[in-house]
Amino acid sequence: MADRESAGAGPGREPLWWQKGVIYQVYPRSFQDSNGDGVGDLEGIRRRLGYLEELGVDAVWISPIYPSPMADFGYDVADYEGIDPLFGTLDDFDRLMAEAGARNLKVILDLVPNHTSDQHPWFREARTSRTHPRRDWYIWRDPAPDGGPPNNWLSEFGGSAWEYDENTGQYYYHAFLASQPDLNWRNPEVAQAIHKAMRFWLDRGVAGFRVDVIWHLLKDKDFRDNPPDPDYRPGMNPYRRLLPVHTTDLAEVHTVIAGLRKVVDGYDDRVLIGEIYLPVERLGAYYGANLDGAHLPFNFALLEVAWEARAVADLIARYEKALPPGGWPNWVLGNHDRPRVASRLGPDQARVAQMLLLTLRGTPTLYYGDEIGMTTVPIPADKVQDPWEKNLPGLGLGRDGVRTPMPWDASANGGFSDVTPWLPLDTNFPEINVMQHRVSSHGMYALTHALLSLRRAHPALAVGAYRPVAATGNLLVYGREAQDERLLVALNLGGEPLLAAFDGLAGQILQSTLCDRVDEAVAGELALRANEGVVVALGRGVAFPAEAG
Ligand code: NOJ
């Protein structure tokens, strides 16, 4: 087996937990409120750990829980070594860790090292004077000759990325909100401070970090203007006007990431995950030149791929090819920034997509609520919370609709809270909720649970090699293989029945997305119903058909 396909870091190595495991993202404001303020909290998450254990995931990644003014709902950190009172206390955190450990669940925290809140003491000090020792922890520039911003760099959340500071007569750089000033990672003291914060949490037992906007950490030291993007059209997100070549994805950023990795490697068995929105060809570099970068540079390509068999198969092939030897793949179908998969593809294809996610080679990350088919909830204008939507209304950038409270049952507020929650629940919560799903033998929860069990039971699925088989029209077929086990995955990406015929095909269905047909024997051909995917265990000695064309 080629090195890039083998499970561990080398021949004979046992796969690590984050290679064979499945990660579940919790958006803490919306998982479970325990203290009646309408916002989820750590004690709420603790009470729901039994649910996650039963679902069958291995690790929980919690979006930021640090003290924050919440201008960007926790992605504006005011203290890297504490818990915001909204979410609880350090004692609550320790209790959550202990119970997660007892249930064999790992906890991964969100690390936000690119920027702080403008309320962080570091920034409050930095802005007091040009000569303050903390001044250089942030990125300051003199105004342009006309008094305007020093260059054309744009904020992802709209407008110039430069904010003028009256008191000291200079501009500071912010890739996101003006209240999220970027740290200056060219200053070694910044690295030391963030590394210290990482150790604070690693010492408390966290299994690793998901690092926010890791590809943003360094910006051009000469502050050159970004060039225009020729593909930009009016009506698009205005950030797209420029190609961010001098503000993101700099070659030198890998040195900074290697520094983060070194901290994590100082502890046993931890994981470093990087948030990176780049084409899959660019992700390879984020593993580090000597695999000393992120263990898992997030692969978000499924969030945007055209839902056609050839497009998906080509994406998988491009990604597999782009991985460095020994680099472990990963896949994501949803997160707190992007539309819900059940809205993007519709509820029927969301099930097919779930089978894809959980049968591809690489660590999957599930977004809370996708296991019950939660959809993007329309948010009335007067309920909008997201600063991105507030800054750039009407462009469809708002993220509130994918951050709505988890509907646990049909009781008031879906069992999420005793009071009106910070964001509205989907109006369909009396029918679509966890309790309903758990009693159904064929719902999205049942499918997700079955696929997670299948991954645990079959090393071919969890860590086996990927074999492309066929991709035409709506039919996508691939194999997964480990030792003497061969599994075939056949997905119908459309709403019409399909027939997949292969010479010598013989096996038994392990799982259908429609949660029936278990153990059905297949021979010679495989009939797929509309919107159906199946996992088939091939009989002993049955080979994968070679991909034609
Ligand atoms: C990426 C996070 O996922 C997003 O939610 C946040 O707004 C930005 N980074 C800024 O921190």
Image (cartoon, grey):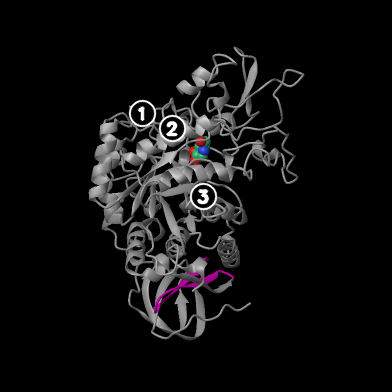
Q: Position of residue 39 (x, y in %)?
A: 34, 32
Question: What is the magenta range?
Answer: 473-496
Q: Which mark is residue 84?
A: 1
- Give the residue type that dot 2 points to: Gly
Left or right: residue 418 compared with residue 404: left
Viewer-proximal residue among 384 and 145:
145
Query: Mark 1: few, some, or many residues within 10 Å (few <14, many ≥20)?
Result: many
Marks 2 & 1, CB-CB < 8 Å contact: yes
Q: Which residue is mark 2?
A: 74
Left or right: residue 323 compared with residue 194: right
Left or right: residue 177 compared with residue 151: left
Kindly tell me whether mark 3's CB lies below 8 Å from ligand 1.
no
Viewer-proximal residue among 230 and 249:
249
Say which quarter of the image contains residue 199: top left
Is disc 3 placed on a helix, strand or loop? loop
- Give the residue type that dot 3 points to: Gly
How far apart are the alpha carbons under marks 2 and 1? Answer: 9 Å
Q: Which residue is mark 3?
A: 293
Say which quarter of the image contains residue 485: bottom left
